[in-house]
Amino acid sequence: MREKKIEQKLVTAVKKHGGICPKFVSPGFDGMPDRLLLLPHGRFAFVEVKAPNQKPRPLQLSRHRLLRRLGFRVYVLDALEDIDKIIKEVMSNETS
């Protein structure tokens, strides 16, 4: 399965839960996650989408650590079966 297919399924699933999942582009700051996961009630996370069994590059891992230190949730998604789990986890957490 290709990364693009997983990404499309993520976007569709987020919409079904009343949210949006726009592509995240950060010119001049490489390595940022691919998607913003924005759900009702201010629920928010970053999602790095990968093809099955692919891992983030070192720069991406560095950006993930930075975002986590700042208090943001960052997920690496490489399997369709993890989409609902990620959405449910983000929806169940209280906002700061």
Image: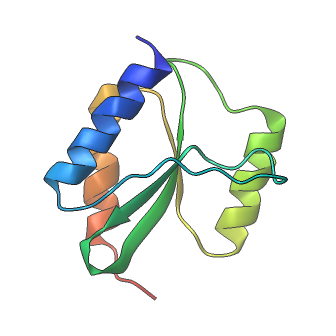
Coordinates of residue 35 in the picture (x, y in percent):
50, 48
**Is residue 51 rendered to the left or right of residue 83?**
right
Coordinates of residue 51 in the picture (x, y in percent):
51, 19
**Residue 84 in the image: above or below residue 7:** below
Identify the residue shown where x is 32% and y is 57%: 20
Coordinates of residue 49 in the picture (x, y in percent):
51, 34
Report the colour scheme: rainbow
Occupied quadrant, residue 71: bottom right
Q: Residue furthest left?
A: 16
**In-front residue for pair 16/25:** 25
Q: Residue furthest front?
A: 27
**Residue 34 in the image: above or below residue 43:** above
Identify the residue shown where x is 37% and y is 21%: 5
Q: Locate the N terminus by quadrant.
A: top left
Total labels drawn: 0
Identify the residue shown where x is 25% and y is 73%: 40
**Is residue 74 rendered to the left or right of residue 39?**
right
Q: Residue furthest bottom?
A: 96
Identify the residue shown where x is 33% and y is 39%: 10
**Is residue 12 rendered to the left or right of residue 7?**
left
**Residue 81 in the image: above or below residue 20:** above
